[in-house]
Image (cartoon, coloured by chain):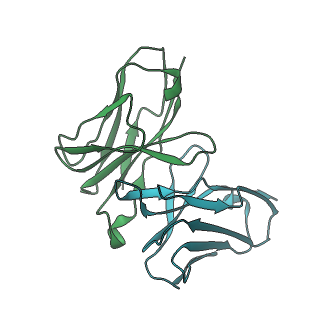
Amino acid sequence: NAGVTQTPKFRILKIGQSMTLQCAQDMNHNYMYWYRQDPGMGLKLIYYSVGAGITDKGEVPNGYNVSRSTTEDFPLRLELAAPSQTSVYFCASSYSKQGAGLAQHFGDGTRLSIL
Amino acid sequence: GQQLNQSPQSMFIQEGEDVSMNCTSSSIFNTWLWYKQDPGEGPVLLIALYKAGELTSNGRLTAQFGITRKDSFLNISASIPSDVGIYFCAGPGGSQGNLIFGKGTKLSVKP
């Protein structure tokens, strides 16, 4: 019962470095999402995907990129890390965008610090 | 854009007390979701509501979909220490038609 798996759990980067946050789900969900969570600010949508090969920007996409080559995987790429990207990143997936399939299932997060 | 306002922002209660929190929207929702986030973990779905007036329970938790479709309520009865965490409401919305989340209610329970 893995659900949504995120790696790594923690990472410290230097300004200007790049990295990829990995996300995989085993529920055969078409919809996948990346959020960032800053203290007291709730969850903000970075990018989302409605299926393999299809991605779109969310509320705060600047400084990030995504790809969706398979149904299972949805990696998030930071090309030039900046201190403003210090946050906790959550990946989520859902069966659909309406009705009973709307509920999103979350991974445990990646805690990223940019120094 | 659409916003969800959760209140209270935080609560400090004694073990055994009942808890009430609510969420209001600037527009009508057709689905309300309540999540709980434990420290260091991702949000976990507690209750989903799909119909105005609906009242749904999950153990000691009860959530209601407001009649106006612009609000929802979550109650926890006889709180225990493991109820500690942040509770989020969520609903479909945003320019992308995805979920939008409230800022959360942080619950602390004193044994």
Q: Is residue A97 above or below residue A38?
A: below
Q: Is residue B101 above or below residue B33?
A: above
Residue A5 point in image, percent of width and height: 37, 44
Residue B66 point in image, percent of width and height: 56, 79
- Total numbered labels placed on residues in the image: 0
Residue B65 point in image, percent of width and height: 53, 78
Residue A41 can be seen in this image: yes
- Nearest to the observer: residue A40 or residue A2: A40
Classify residue B72 as left or right of residue A69: right
Identified at 50% across, 49% down, the residue is B42
User: In which quadrant is the C terminus of chain B drawn?
Assistant: bottom right
Residue A2 can be seen in this image: no
Q: Give the chain letter for green.
A: A
Residue B56 point in image, percent of width and height: 53, 81
Classify residue A34 as left or right of residue B42: left
Q: Is residue B16 above or below residue B52?
A: above
- Quarter where residue A81 is shown: top left
Classify residue A87 as left or right of residue A18: right
Identified at 68% across, 59% down, the residue is B82
Identified at 24% across, 37% down, the residue is A67
Name the tint of chain B in the rendering.
Answer: cyan
